[in-house]
Image: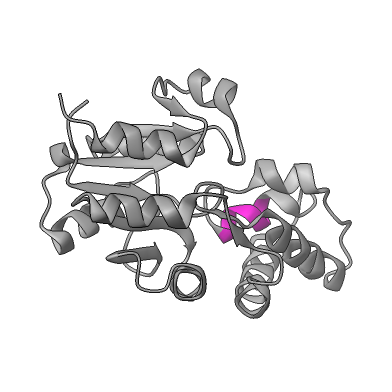
Amino acid sequence: MKKYKLAVFDMDGTILDTLADLHLSVNHILVEAGFPERSLEEVRQFVGNGIHKLIERAVPEGTSEEKIDELFENMLAYYKDHCTEHTAPYEGIPELIDTLKAGGIKVAVVSNKAHTAVQKLCEQYFKGQFMAAVGDRPGALRKPAPDSVNAVLTELGVNREDAVYIGDSDVDVQTAKNANMDCIGVDWGFRGEKFLRSYGCDNIVFSPKEIAEQLLSVD
């Protein structure tokens, strides 16, 4: 495999295990609204398309758009203050980032998580490690649209053929396709190997070490 110049990582389920905090935050908002709580496995299946879509999937069928928008704003505010209580990097990820940078590969994050949360989590768990970190923000379409990936490519001065997108979900596979980039799927996230293969991802890794081996090898 060729040596890439840039590795762009998804956040939730790829570099950070955020599921517990997302689950607790969603249920806090649902209970406040008088709605039934959701299980951890339900929330696992709901994430990937941003907080607004997470809320849409979590509320009871027939909930009005106005109510969903209200709960979305509540979720943004609550999660911002509670997004680090149970979250942690997956084992080997911080070391992977350092290894890639030492090998001359730039590293970045592109997530559908709110931009403020992406910035906060990168600062807390990966201080100074990533060269760019972009979340959901006004004026840019969220993944699987390639807007944020394209912005990172421009910011870091890398051609898309020299970059690879790394993630754990169907959204990430489609993001890479839409950005005309290679893709690596990770088995340890919110979906898993079988699910990723069903969406056309053939390059799947089972440990951060495998990513380093692939990206730092030279044909």
Relative to 149, is 169 on the left or the right? right
Task: Kindly indicate the quadrant of the structure image that contains residue 176.
Answer: top left
Does the magenta-highlighted stretch encompass residue 6?
no
Does the magenta-highlighted stretch encompass residue 55?
yes
**Relative vertical location of residue 109 with respect to residue 173 in this rendering, above or below:** below
Say how the picture is coloured. one colour
Relative to 132, is 126 on the left or the right? right
Is 73 or 128 nearer to us in this picture?
128
**Relative vertical location of residue 212 with respect to residue 155 in this rendering, above or below:** above
Image: magenta residue range: 51-56
Q: Which x, y percent locates residue 37?
A: 86, 56
Q: Which x, y percent locates residue 141?
A: 35, 56
* Quadrant location, the C terminus: top left
Identify the residue at horizontal 64%, vertical 61% (top origin): 65
Tell me if residue 91 can be seen. Answer: yes
Magenta span: predominant SS is helix
Relative to 144, is 41 on the left or the right? right
Is 152 or 5 nearer to us in this picture?
5
Q: Which x, y percent locates residue 4?
A: 19, 40
Identify the residue at horizontal 29%, vertical 50% (top origin): 100
Identify the residue at horizontal 29%, vertical 47% (top origin): 7
**Relative vertical location of residue 63 with respect to residue 117 in this rendering, above or below:** above
* Quadrant location, the N terminus: top left
Task: Kindly indicate the quadrant of the structure image that contains residue 119.
Answer: bottom left
Tell me if residue 177 can be seen. Answer: no
Relative to 215, is 123 on the left or the right? right
